[in-house]
Amino acid sequence: MPKVDRRIQKTQLALKNAVIELMSEKDFDQITIQDIADRANLNRGTIYLHYQDKYDLLDKLIDSQINELAEMDEWACDEDWTDAFIPYFEYFRQNHLFFSTMLTSKGSGPSYFRTRLLAHVIKGFEREIDRESGKNSNLSDDVILQYAGTAYVGLIEWWIVSGMPYPPEVMAKQVGALLERSL
Amino acid sequence: MPKVDRRIQKTQLALKNAVIELMSEKDFDQITIQDIADRANLNRGTIYLHYQDKYDLLDKLIDSQINELAEMDEWACDEDWTDAFIPYFEYFRQNHLFFSTMLTSKGSGPSYFRTRLLAHVIKGFEREIDRESGKNSNLSDDVILQYAGTAYVGLIEWWIVSGMPYPPEVMAKQVGALLERSL
DNA sequence: GCTGTTTTGTTCATATCTCAACACATGATC
DNA sequence: GATCATGTGTTGAGATATGAACAAAACAGC
């Protein structure tokens, strides 16, 4: 990774937080580039140095968030299946503002971020399906993945929107157990 | 006022917060320029674009804070004497991190900021002494000012350090009453 | 339709910040 | 005293952000 210039990092962080704030206040389509620039305390032109328009900005914001998740996938993949989810739920808690806003925001139709997240989750589950014991012999992979994926994403959203009523470890263990049954 | 470039404002704000944080953790003399740069997430060289050294930085930080106070002096001077202090205590509450850190920090000897603040307060009180009714006819201005000034500053520090147990309006009214008796 | 207002993208010259490197001082350790 | 590590202050080239201006679009109200 060629280290990124400090100023770019700060600009992107400011933009991310600005978008999160604004999206929790109004519909994304009603947000103007000027709004974002003002909230991020940046010159409007600066945004165009990095993004095509506000949709590109949102896209790349989501991209980088998904990528962070993807990096965690590699970092710890074959741990004990019951502890494997702990870092994820800690991550969700740290970024709960992003997740809650993006998952619940109703731009037009169901959240674009949910779609992206679901796709990523399903891709990660693909290689975890039990194809040996025979317990899934009369089930299609498609069905299993869609089932487990939506369940997982739905649970994440519920947990965050409800104010994270259980600590990350508790969520992680239970999710691990349920997924192990489903996959 | 020629408007200041956004970047300068951000840099100064970041430095201010960094210094506040660090001073609440360790003695100012033990704080290194690199510490400040790291905490402010700035390049070390950037600090030298604005300040001679860390002492100059602290000086100018204090300067600007005192100047903000001075601007409030002009904004509303001859209101009702019992309400006049409300904006000040609201200001103290907003900046309580700065005031508590600067007032209680023991660089070497008593706080430099306290000295500066006291001088400013006394200067503001000078024209408020009652020289007509005769109630102060056998008192020296010096004595009155030192008395009222230290009392005021001491009360501010107590209020902030104690976690601001009374709302600003309550403090303002009582301080107004007490100062009216003293001046 | 037309008209005034807002938002958008883009451009340019300039200001500020960054990064890396440097020489020098300070202080600790042997 | 020599050596090593750490902090300082400075420099230079380059990268990024700024502010201001502009034309074109998008949009509202009439």
Image (cartoon, coloured by chain):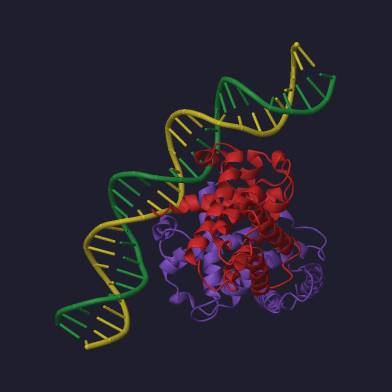
Chain colours: A red, B purple, C yellow, D green
Residue B93 visible in image: yes
Residue sitting nearer the eye, B8 or A101: A101
Residue sitting nearer the eye, B80 or B64: B64
Above or below, B124 against C29 in this view is: above
Q: Where is residue B180 in the image (x, y as percent from the top left)?
A: 79, 71
Residue sitting nearer the eye, A182 or B40: A182
Above or below, B92 against A48 in this view is: below
Residue drawn 72% across the image and 39% down it: A30
Above or below, A43 against B28 in this view is: above
Q: Quadrant of the N terminus of chain B?
A: top right
Q: Position of residue A112 (x, y in %)?
A: 66, 45
Residue A65 visible in image: no
**Mark count:** 0
Q: Position of residue B17 (x, y in %)?
A: 56, 64
Above or below, A146 against B87 in this view is: above
Residue drawn 54% across the image and 63% down it: B16
Q: In which quarter of the image is the C terminus of chain B?
A: bottom right
Residue drawn 78% across the image and 62% down it: B84
